[in-house]
Image: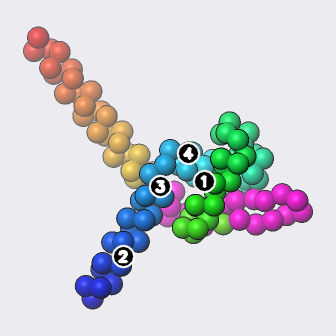
Amino acid sequence: MKNIDKKIYELHSELCKTLSNPIRLEILSQLREGEKSVSELVDALKIRQANLSQHLAVLRQRKIVIASKKGTNVFYKISNPKIVQACDLIREVLFEQLAETEELAKLVRAKK
């Protein structure tokens, strides 16, 4: 069982590394409502297609997104809706931390 745990920790770490890039998080945010073409993503993210393609390749490799070809267009979608839920949970934690930091700053200012 320990070897399985270690493998899961390694996979968890790799997934988190993949999601640690702000552009990849923006891509996932764009895809949360459904599949989009590469050109739609380029327009929405305001980045070059070559840069987008590199990030999409990483997301595909980690099986976070799925690509499908329709005619000459390639469309991407999130492979598992739990990815969106995980990102949402992390954002909630960040907002809570920011709120706590702001409250702390107010207390410090009030004491001065």
Residue 108: where, in percent of width, then height?
14, 20
Q: Which residue is mark 3?
A: 19
Residue type for callout 4: Ile
Q: Is residue 69 left or right of residue 100?
A: right
In the picture, the disc for residue 79 is: none
Q: Nearer the viewer, residue 108 or 46?
A: 46
> Which residue is found at the position 70% from the left and 59% from the top?
76
In the picture, the disc for residue 55 is: 1
In the picture, the disc for residue 23 is: 4
Report, in whole angstroms, how far the alpha carbon at label 4 lies from the one at label 2: 25 Å
N-term-proximal mark, 1 vs 3: 3
Q: Which residue is mark 2?
A: 8
Residue type for callout 2: Ile
> Which residue is found at the position 30% from the left and 33% from the top?
99
Residue 9: where, in percent of width, then height?
33, 72
Q: Nearer the viewer, residue 11 or 78?
A: 11
Residue 39: where, in percent of width, then height?
78, 47
Q: Which residues are magenta?
A: 67-87
Verify whether residue 100 appears in magenta: no
Q: Is residue 48 left or right of residue 63?
A: right
Marks 1, 3: nearer the viewer: 1
Crowding near the residue tagged with mark 2, few <14, some 14–19, many ≥20 C-alpha atoms within 10 Å: few
Verify whether residue 85 appears in magenta: yes
Residue type for callout 1: His
Report, in whole angstroms, how far the alpha carbon at label 1 lies from the one at label 3: 10 Å
Secondary element under disc 4, as helix, strand or loop, is helix
